[in-house]
Each structure stands twice: as C-alpha cells, then as structure tokens.
Amino acid sequence: MSEMIYGIHAIQGMLARSPERILDVYLLKNREDKRLNTLVQEIESLRLQVKVVDRKWLDEQSSQGVHQGIMAKIKEGRNYHENDLPDLLTKKADPFILILDGVTDPHNLGACIRTADATGVDLIIIPKDKSAPLNAIAKKVACGAAESVPVIRVTNLARTLRMLKEEHQIWIVGTAGEADHSLYQSNLTGKLAIIMGAEGEGMRRLTKEHCDELISIPMSGFVSSLNVSVATGICLFESVRQKAKIDK
C-alpha cells in the first residue's frame, strides 16, 4: 500500500525520519525556489527518482491542496490501533497524552499534531467517528510530525478514558469554558492526558463526565473562544512550563 504526501516540510520530515519509505517524487516543471532546489538536491543524493510534472497534475493529485510544487508517493506508515495503547503506555514513566474529541478539520488536526510533537506528547488519541482523517492535508500542516507522534483512533472514547484512569493512573484533564478554574491554577505534571474539544461545541457530554478535572483558558477580550489548535498549544506548553519548573 502507498499514499501521497505533499509540501516541502512534509517531505523534509519524511527524508529525515524514514527516507526508505519514499517511492517516487514529483516536481513541478520550471519551478524555481531555493528551498525546493535544496530539497531536490537532497532527494537526488539518495538516488531517488524525481519525475517532472505539470501544475494540473499536482493540483489534481493534491485535490487542489497547497503542494508547493512537490509531492511524493510513499509506503504507507504504521497504523496504530487500540491494542497498541497498553504497550505504548507502559514504555513511559509519566505518559503525556493529547486527546482530541470532535476535531473534524484536517488542518486543525495537523496543527495539533505539530504542537504535540514540539511539546513532547507521547501519543494522540482520537475517536473513530466525527474526527478528521490523517490525510495529506493534515500531514502537510503537521510538517513531518505525523511520522513521529503515534495517532490512535479508538472506537469508544469513554471506555478508553476509563482504561487510562483505572489501569494506568493517568489524570484526565478536560478543557471547558464553564470550568471553575484556569489551566494556570491546575497541576499539569505527572501522568497526564489533556482533552481538547471541538470549536464551539467543546467536548461531548460523556467525555466530560470521564474527566478528573475541568480547566479553562482565561479570555479577556471580545472573542469568547480560540481555534482548537491555538488552545491546544496554550495548554500543552503550560504543562511543559510546569514540568520544567519542577526539574530545576
């Protein structure tokens, strides 16, 4: 099985982590770009074949995505499943988990994966239903991070949350506007899972009921909510800040 990825950062990430998975590279005819030329030189140094194509072909293959003049066919990566969770969790002394409940935009999914990688998140959990696909759009926005952070789709999120708490003693923190305290008043260290809900709707009721704690992000202006990827970054980096303070 193979899949297509596109965009300079996505292909750079693949070259850095798993160059053996690259089957073919497609380059836009007459495209002059310093970053692209450097990338092509790296690809050619690995003796990978580069095929020159026209813009129409790239536009069609990327479904009109922002391909930046380059695309690659790659061997399909590992797909993680619920059965992989116990093994992934036991390898970490203090698992750091991001859970996305109802994030349906692949751009937001990709941005959250990118931030998760930057903050050292060990794995991402998303429900199978009503969640964005991990497609070429998400991988482009993730800038290569989709190859380094396991993304696990689960059939029943509530059951997974119970397992995290009962079998692995992980503290479940959900984000909600009605929370009675902010993330800056919460302890975001140790074995931790942070749940981010969909924009507007937030977490589903059953997901919220399985949280050990609800936190909010203080809002001072006219806007009442943030893009989910921005809110994810704020929460994850606050956890990083708190952990760094303990380590000093």
Image (cartoon, rainbow, N blue to C red):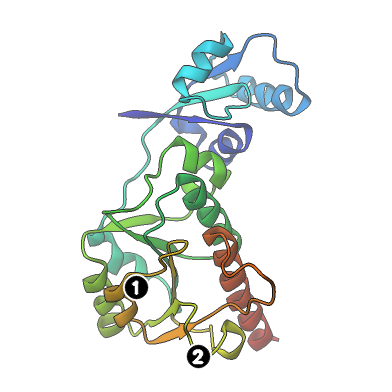
Which corner quadrant of the image does residue 212 belong to?
bottom left
Q: Where is residue 201? Give x, y as percent.
A: 40, 65
On the rendered structure, is 11 left or right of 99? right
Does residue 19 sit above or below 27 in this rendering?
below
Q: Which quadrant: the C terminus?
A: bottom right
226 vs 179: above or below: above
Mark 2 or 1: in front is 2
Q: Which mark is residue 3?
A: none
The part of the image, by quadrant, that contains residue 226 is bottom right
Residue 68: x and y in percent read 63, 26
Q: Is residue 144 visible?
A: no
| Left/right of residue 33 with respect to residue 92 in the rendered view | right
Q: Position of residue 133 (x, y in %)?
A: 37, 44
The Cα atoms of the two marked residues, 2 and 1, are separated by: 33 Å
Q: Label 2 neighbourhood size at 10 Å, few (<14), some (14-19), many (20+)? A: few
Q: Which mark is residue 180?
A: 2
N-terminal of the two: label 2 or label 1? 1
Identify the residue under disc 1.
90
Does the rendering let one see residue 22? yes
Q: Secondary structure at mark 1?
A: helix
Q: Residue at x 70, y 25 (%)?
A: 36
Q: Position of residue 138 (x, y in %)?
A: 48, 43
CB within 8 Å, label 2 to label 1: no
The residue nearer to you, when weighing 1 against 71, is 71
Provide the secondary structure element on which disc 2 rests: loop
**Residue at image coords 44%, 32%:** 21
Q: Nearer the viewer, residue 98 or 149?
A: 98
Type of amino acid at the residue the image marks with label 2: Asp
Classify 187 as above or below 143. Answer: below
